[in-house]
């Protein structure tokens, strides 16, 4: 995005420079500036480690590690070049490796960071104050891991990847850092480009709803059931969705259901009774193209002289 100087009668475009042209290093300069004011790229975040490297079996170093007000971990990866390289893949790797960080490990890392930066404060007390906790809440700590990517620009490959990963439930933010020089002063334009700030609340809500749907799907009841008639096993090892079918089949075989009873049950949406059909109700296309899994019941001839047409149970595969 261009920046203009307001002159008396015109707008004067401010020329953008680069970190390289200004001889600014990634770690010694950009990282140093941001770690002391991390809210510039990640609001409500506390940096607890710099160049974090306590990974089992790996000597990689995470630029900055933080926590937010919701006690989520925040992985912050910085690049000064123009395309960001493969920073999103690197950040995902780091996020996976810190995802199991415990409260005690976070306190230890923060204590080390405070010592490195010359801050004489108690690490655990500072963390508790930041989170507004009276005592450590182990079950609420580090439930999720967010990622913040900051670079002078992002390639289309990175932004496309990040948008897709956010769409499937991840939480990744891209922040563009663009240096400008004005009247001998070096300015830094900081702009969040993914997700767009205007759409951020909506996208977070959508992401949470998708996550809830996945959790609900994973929690579906897959247990098997058994049906007994007069204490004798009638059908064993069937799914909950088949209760209606086997119940009607058992009633039919024992002549305990007639047309009116069958119609009454089909108006009840519990136990999938509404999915039961008599043979003559099956459409020709359903039989021809096998769109439904079908099973024959015995005739509904029990009790009160109802019709002898067999019943068929239909359910989408």
Image: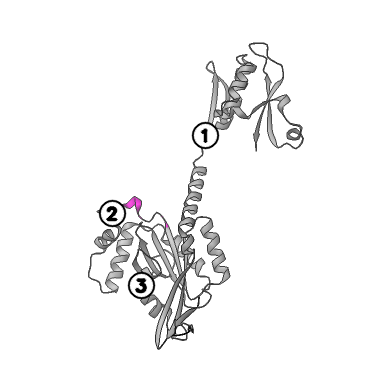
Task: Single out the mark in the foreground, 3 or 1.
Answer: 3
Residue, far bottom: 184
Q: Is residue 140 magenta?
A: yes
In the shown orientation, is residue 37 left or right of residue 258? left
Q: Find out whether the residues at labels 3 and 1 contact each other: C-beta distance under 8 Å.
A: no
Could you tell me how far apart the alpha carbons at marks 2 and 1 are, in whole angstroms? 38 Å
Between 165 and 179, the one lying in front of the other is 179
Report helix, strand or loop for mark 2. Answer: loop
Label 1, residues with CA under 10 Å away: few <14, some 14-19, many ≥20 = few
Q: Earlier in the sequence, mark 2 or mark 3?
A: 3
Look at the picture and state if 305 lies above or below 21.
Answer: above
Numbered disc total:
3
Q: Which residue is mark 2?
A: 136
Query: Which numbered disc flags the more N-terminal residue, 2 or 1?
Result: 2
Q: Crowding near pointer 3: few (<14 within 10 Å), some, many (20+)?
A: many
Instruction: Judge whether residue 173 can be spotted in this image.
Output: yes
Q: On the image, numbered disc 1 is attached to which residue?
A: 223
- Looking at the image, which residue is at 30% across and 69% down? 112
Identify the residue under disc 3: 35
Across and down, in percent, residue 118 comes to 26, 74
Q: Are marks 2 and 3 in contact (CB under 8 Å)?
A: no
Circles 2 and 1: CB distance less than 8 Å? no
Q: Residue at x 45, y 80 (%)?
A: 179
Q: Quadrant of the C terminus?
A: top right
> For the residues carrying marks 2 and 1, which lies nearer the camera in this image?
2
Q: Nearer the viewer, residue 140 or 37?
A: 37
Q: Is residue 45 magenta?
A: no
Residue extending farthest front: 9
The picture places residue 296, in percent across and down from the top left corner, at 69, 25
Instruction: Report the magenta residues as a range.
Output: 137-144
């Amino acid at each position: 995005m261009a920046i203009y100087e307001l002159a008396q009668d015109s707008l004067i475009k401010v020329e953008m420079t680069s970190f390289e042209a200004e001889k600014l290093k990634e770690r010694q300069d950009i990282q140093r500036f941001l770690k002391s004011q991390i809210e510039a790229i990640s609001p409500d975040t506390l940096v607890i480690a710099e160049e974090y490297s306590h990974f089992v079996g790996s000597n990689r170093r995470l630029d900055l590690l933080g926590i937010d007000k919701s006690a989520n971990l925040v992985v912050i990866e910085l690049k000064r070049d123009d395309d960001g390289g493969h920073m999103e893949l690197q950040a995902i790797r780091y996020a996976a490796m810190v995802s199991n960080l415990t409260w005690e490990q976070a306190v230890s890392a923060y204590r080390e960071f405070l010592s490195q930066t010359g801050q004489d404060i108690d690490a655990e007390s500072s963390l508790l104050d930041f989170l507004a906790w009276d005592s450590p809440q182990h079950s609420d700590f580090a439930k999720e891991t967010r990622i913040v990517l900051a670079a002078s620009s992002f390639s289309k490959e990175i932004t496309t990847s990040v948008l897709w990963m956010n769409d499937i439930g991840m939480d990744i933010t891209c922040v563009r850092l663009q240096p400008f020089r004005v009247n001998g002063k070096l300015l830094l334009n900081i702009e969040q480009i993914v997700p767009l700030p205007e759409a951020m609340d909506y996208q977070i809500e959508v992401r949470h709803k998708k996550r809830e749907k996945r959790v609900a799907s994973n929690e579906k009841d897959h247990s098997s059931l058994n049906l007994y008639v007069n204490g004798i096993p009638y059908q064993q090892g069937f799914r909950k969705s088949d209760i209606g079918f086997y119940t009607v089949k058992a009633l039919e075989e024992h002549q305990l259901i007639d047309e009116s009873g069958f119609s009454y049950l089909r108006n009840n949406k519990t136990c999938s009774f509404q999915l039961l059909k008599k043979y003559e109700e099956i459409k020709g296309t359903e039989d021809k193209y096998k769109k439904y899994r079908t099973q024959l019941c015995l005739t509904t001839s029990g009790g009160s002289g109802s019709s002898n047409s067999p019943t068929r149970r239909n359910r989408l595969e």
